[in-house]
Image (cartoon, rainbow, N blue to C red):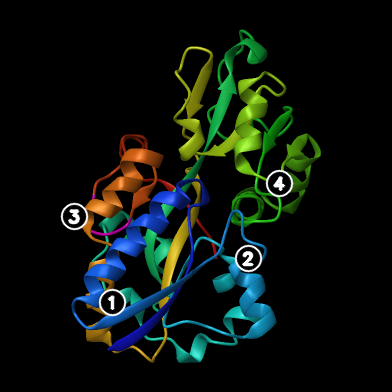
Amino acid sequence: MRRITMFWSNVCVLGRQEVRHVEEAAKRLREKGIELTTTFFGLGQEEGLAEFVSRTEETADLMISTDLTMFEDERIFGTFRERLIPARELRALKPCVADSSIACNPLLLPVLVIPLVMVVNRACWGERPLPLGFADIVEERKSYGGRDNSAGKGLNRQLAALYGDAFMESFNGNADVFEMPVQAFQAVQKGRVPVSIVPTLFAMRADDTELAVIYPKEGAVTVPSFLAVRDTVSMELAKDLIEAIFPAGFCDFYAENGHIFPCFKGCADTGLTSENGFRFLYQP
């Protein structure tokens, strides 16, 4: 029996479904002589994946994560970078992803893209024209979540890259920054702030009567989910594992249940991203 280990830190709100799917994939792989053992990180866990790897320097054969500190903080990524195979080659990507900065690292295979968009409470906003992008809300009271995770950190990095550090600091000067993105959605939903920046997973709950969903003209700030593969796994075996763990139907599940964009060619698009030309903002 070939033993494969996997670290999984992905979309927390859909965590139960993810765990169930991984367990089913493990059963299918067991029939092929592969024993897949998965350690889950994320909501409800005492320690995040990046924290765990930083503390222990332990890695797995497969590592999938939206905890981008794993791959963007050189103090962590640098400890295992040299032991990775070129995962970017393992699966064909949609052109809008393959040709973007999301696919810039040959060692990382983009699996999903979580877009962050604006949600405006029409009653709080008043009679003014609705904002079109981040530049239109820099002086407005607003909220966003993910203070200590990839959502909040990514938003600040993209704002600074687009408009400079002074803009980003001014933007934050009028912002309520929550621990979790869902708290930002609740804040605009209840009228505590006129506008919030939230993942599509929450934004698309809006009915467009009281709440308006706006895809920023600059593009949606994105939180990618990346897959890294250690050199303990051959390219051929890695392809088989990815096919088993991420069949098209499972990737479509994210699009249908969370308005999360699957990166692999042949998987479903999401209406909001396709209607807006797949404009993603991501800078590692």
Mark 4 residue element: loop
Circle 2 packing at 10 Å, graded few (<14), some (14-19), many (20+), is: some
State the separation of the CA atoms marked 3 and 1: 16 Å
Secondary element under disc 2, as helix, strand or loop, is: loop
Query: Which amino acid type is marked by label 1?
Result: Glu
- Image disc number at residue 118: none
Quadrant location of the C terminus? bottom right
Pointer 4 residue: 179
**Which residue is at the far top?**
127
| Residues at marks 1 and 2 touching, judged by CB atoms closer than 8 Å | no
Residue at x-position 45% and y-position 47%: 14
Number of other residues with Cα within 10 Å of mark 1, as a class: few under 14, some 14 to 19, many 20 or more = some
Query: Which of the two discs, 2 and 4, labels the residue nearer the N terminus?
Result: 2
Gap in angstroms between the C-alphas marked 1 and 2: 27 Å
Dot 1 and dot 4 residues touching (CB under 8 Å): no
Lateral position of residue 103 relative to residue 250, left or right: right
Residue segment shown in magenta: 263-267
Residue beneath the point at 76% across and 36% down: 176
- Indicate which disc residue 89 carries: 1
On the picture, is 251 further left or further right than 144? left
Q: At 72% from the left edge and 42% from the top edge, which residue is drawn?
A: 178
Q: Examine the residues drawn in magenta and state their main secondary structure.
A: loop
Q: Was residue 218 drawn as part of the magenta stretch in this picture? A: no
Q: Amino acid at mark 3?
A: Gly
Q: Label 3, on which residue? A: 266
Q: Residue at x 46, y 39 (%)?
A: 201
Amino acid beneath label 4 = Glu
**Gap between marks 2 and 4 measured at Cα:** 14 Å
Q: Which residue is mark 2?
A: 48
Q: Residue furthest right?
A: 173
- The reply to whether residue 30 is in sight is yes
Is disc 4 surrounded by few (<14), some (14 to 19) or many (20+) residues within 10 Å?
A: some
